Structure formats: C-alpha cells, structure tokens
Amino acid sequence: MAVHNRMPMTGSLVPAKKVAVSVAALTLAVGLVFQRCTTMQDERRYPMPGVMGEVKGQRMHLDCRGQGSSTLVLRADLGDSVSTWSLFQPNVAKFTWVCSYDSPGLG
C-alpha cells in the first residue's frame, strides 16, 4: 500500500485567485487605455461640425448652418449627439437657418 502526501487544496487556490484578479485588472487597464487612445484618434480624424461651448458650467455642442430669417432648432436628446441630425440638417439648411445642439453635458 502506497502512501501519498497531499497538499490541502485551499492553500493553492489563494495564489490562483490573486493571479485571476491581477489578470482581470490588467485587462481592464489595457482596455481603458486603448479606448481612450482610439477615441482621441477618431476625434482628430472625424471632427464634429460646429463649435463646443459652455452653458452654465456644462459643455455643449452647437452646429448652425444655412441662411434665412427663420430658425429651426433641432435638439439631440435621450443621450444622442448632434450627429443624429447629420443627414437631415444639411437638407433643411438649403431653405432656412437651422441649429442643432446636444443636451448640456453630453456634447
């Protein structure tokens, strides 16, 4: 009859948990850095039309186009941005002055 020395399982799980948490934290950090870098790159490549301004301490994006005596105001709401109106606004701008804006704080 052979006798085997066995180590308790609970002691070996602690390093495995530390490794798993470390890998998850590293993956999250790399993902956040990658997302930020690619977002900055996209903002340079594809700038939003219009201007950024501040209203009551909140950043706001405003895009005005066209000409005429009347003004049509388009609000991007429910978390959308000015780009929601990107197909509609140029066509309306042929006939009148049209401005679109983000909800304050979302631009």
Image (spheres, rainbow, N blue to C red):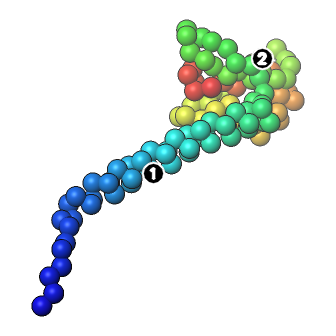
Label 2 or label 1, whichever comes before in sequence order: 1
Q: Quadrant of the N terminus?
A: bottom left
Q: Amino acid at mark 1?
A: Val
> Given the current orientation, which residue lies at the most extreme top position?
56
> Given the current orientation, which residue lies at the most extreme front position?
2
Residue depicted at 67% across the width and 22% down the height: 61
Query: Could one spot residue 94 in this view of the protein?
Result: yes
Determine which of the numbered discs, if any, sits on residue 70 in the image: 2
Q: Classify mark 1: residues with Cα within 10 Å, few (<14), some (14-19) or many (20+).
A: few
Q: Is residue 9 left or right of residue 22?
A: left
Residue depicted at 67% across the width and 37% down the height: 37
* Residue sitting nearer the eye, 16 or 89: 16
Residue depicted at 70% across the width and 18% down the height: 52
Please say if 43 is above or below 23.
above
Q: Position of residue 14 (x, y in %)?
A: 27, 54
Q: Secondary structure at mark 2?
A: loop
Could you say which quadrant of the image residue 98 lies in?
A: top right
Determine which of the numbered discs, if any, sits on residue 85 in the image: none
Query: Could one spot residue 84 in this view of the protein?
Result: no
Question: Depth-wise, is mark 2 or mark 1 nearer the camera?
Answer: 1
Q: Amino acid at mark 2?
A: Ser
Q: Which residue is mark 1?
A: 23
Residue depicted at 74% across the width and 19% down the height: 51
> Given the current orientation, which residue lies at the most extreme bottom position?
1
Q: Position of residue 11 (x, y in %)?
A: 22, 58
Q: Is residue 107 left or right of residue 99?
A: left
Q: Is residue 6 left or right of residue 104?
A: left
Q: Secondary structure at mark 1?
A: helix
